[in-house]
Amino acid sequence: ARTNRDYVVGKVCNEIHEMIRVLQLTTYDEEEWDADDITVMKKALNAIEGKMKQAQDWLQDPNALVGGSGERALRQILDDALKIADRCAHPADRDAIVKAVSDIQSMADALAELRAQGKGCSPQAVALAKGIQQKLMENTTLGRKVVTYFTMQNLNKKTKGKYIGAYRAFESVMYSTR
């Protein structure tokens, strides 16, 4: 009985070790599984909207910690905005998002530096925080427009022209507001 038990335990241990080895060799990257651009763009937009309150709270609090969760949320928002920009259909939109992200990053760096020096309540820091908030909201609105436009464009391709009228109306409204 002991020999049989040792044999079974040995086999089970070997199988478990093999499973662990295979799992360690296997990597999973969510981005790789997102085959289409729409999925990546929508995930990025949802992530942006989910982190927005935390970033806004950090911007509104002149005594917030540098490197804290609010600042990290702001920087993750900017990374997600670049994911949307990478998949933009229109170069003008891509360039606008990339420029806005660059501007916001520079402003956030300056704000973090002021706060690290204990000057978070200074007029310059307050103005920077408000400027970042405004640019962040403008960039998020542009990101929403890009994702909606891209979704409509794909819907148009999939339905083979069923909704061309609505699509063209949306397109004219979207690009006439610039």
Image: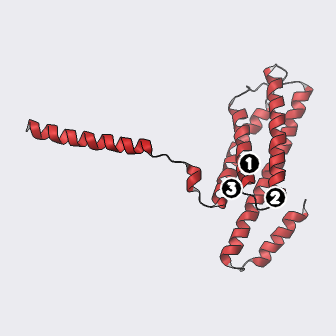
Q: Which residue is mark 3?
A: 41
- Circle 2 or circle 3, nearest the eye: 2
Residue 153 appears anywhere in the view:
yes
Q: Picture quarter containing residue 34?
A: bottom right
Residue highlighted by disc 1: 82
Secondary structure of the residue carrying tag 2 is helix
Real-space Cα separation, disc 2 to disc 1, in angstroms: 13 Å
Three-letter code for the amino acid on which mark 3 is drawn: Met
Contact, mark 2 vs mark 1 (Cβ under 8 Å)? no
Residue plotted at (67% across, 46% down): 50
Element marked by disc 3 = helix
| Most foreground residue, 35 or 174 | 35
- Callout 1: 10 Å neighbours few (<14), some, many (20+)? many
Where, quadrant-wise, is the C terminus in this rendering?
A: bottom right
> Which residue type does callout 1 highlight?
Leu
Give the labeled residue for mark 2: 91
Single out the mark in the foreground, 2 or 1: 2
Tag 2: residue type?
A: Pro
Above or below for 148 versus 119: below
Residue in the picture at 66% in, 59% down: 37
- Left or right: 57, with 14 as reference point: right
Q: Please tell me which of labels 1 and 3 falls first in the chain.
A: 3
Point out the tag, 2 or 1, that comes first from the N-terminus. Answer: 1
Identify the residue at horizontal 7%, vertical 39% (top origin): 1
Decide: marks 2, 3 in contact (CB < 8 A)?
A: no
**How far apart are labels 1 and 3 at the CA level?**
10 Å
Q: Residue at x 64, y 53 (%)?
A: 43
Q: Which one is nearer the viewer's eye here, 38 or 66?
A: 38
Which numbered mark, 1 or 3, is in the foreground of this view?
A: 1
Residue 137 visible in image: no
Q: Find residue 157 and name its label.
A: none
